[in-house]
Image (spheres, grey):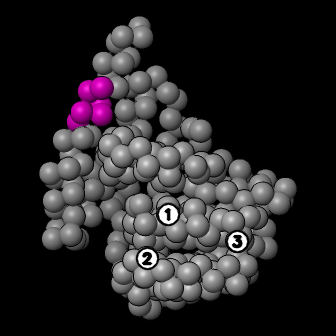
Amino acid sequence: MALTEAAVAEHVARAWAAGRGGAIVTANVDIVRAATRDPSLAELVAGSELVVADGMPVVWAGRLAGTAVPERVTGASLVHTLSARAAREGRSVYLLGGDPGVPETAAKALAARSPGLRIAGALSPPYGFDADPEAYRDVIRQVAAARPGLVLVGLGFPRQERLIRDLRPDLPAAWFLGCGAGIPMAAGQFSRAPRALQRAGGEWLHRLALEPRRLARRYLRDDAPFALALLAGALLSRFRHS
């Protein structure tokens, strides 16, 4: 579904009013690359109600292929947009992910930005919790017990999407956003690129400069060649159909 960021918020608000929950995947180049190579990950993405283009190469590829993708919609931006909408609609927010103390700091920042926002909880799961069945179940129990209307899950793909999938049966009326680094960004741990660089598709360079050790291999060896191939394939598809 090709939606603007504002339209995503409207969709979520209508679903809340109707008592329906859902999940949002913010598909950047890394997620698209992983999903095209692993059918189980493609199925994980397809199980979400909304999949938005988080990454200018994804937007450009869609447009080249003939799909009217209106704009880039990032997890980092949706953290703020959906939290503000939750405050308007009287829904609570749960933040899950980030280093110890980070989700709590992000919660305070979001509450300050959106007066009236109710924070249902904030949790930094211990490293490797998802490999320990009891620790994993405990995280699910804590989130489910808080009964939030919106759950922001920042654990990286596909861990956050797998946890969202397993949480949804306990919170059928809640909306879930897999937001990657959106929680530490909301907390001020990382900054976003200047808007001009974002629009030009260069935010990955900003992130690379901030976290070179963690991101260099992924961005330079894996994602950059895939992004070029994605754009070339989209252009070829356009020519074939025309």
- Measure the alpha-carbon separation of dots 3 and 1: 14 Å
Answer with mark 1 or mark 2, whichever residue precedes in sequence.
Answer: 2
Tell which of 46 and 186 is nearer to you. Answer: 46
Q: Amino acid at mark 2?
A: Asp
Position in image of residue 103 (x %, y %) = 49, 84
| Residue highlighted by disc 1 | 162
Q: Residue, x 62% and y 69% (percent of image)? A: 167
Residue 137 location, quadrant: bottom right
Q: Is residue 16 left or right of residue 201?
A: right
Please tell me how crowded label 1 is: few (under 14), some (14-19), or many (20+) other residues with Cα within 10 Å.
some
Q: Amino acid at mark 3?
A: Asp
| Residue highlighted by disc 2 | 130
Image quadrant where one finds the C terminus: top left
Image quadrant where one finds the N terminus: top right
Position in image of residue 203 (x %, y %) = 30, 56
- Measure the alpha-carbon separation of dots 1 and 2: 10 Å
Element carrying mark 1: helix
> Residue 170 — which label?
3
Element carrying mark 3: helix
Residue 207 location, quadrant: bottom left
Q: Is residue 61 left or right of residue 212?
A: right
Whether residues under marks 1 and 2 lie with C-beta atoms below 8 angstroms apart, the answer is: yes
What is the span of residues highlighted in magenta in the rendered image? 228-233
Tell which of 229 and 112 is nearer to you. Answer: 229
Q: Amino acid at mark 1?
A: Arg
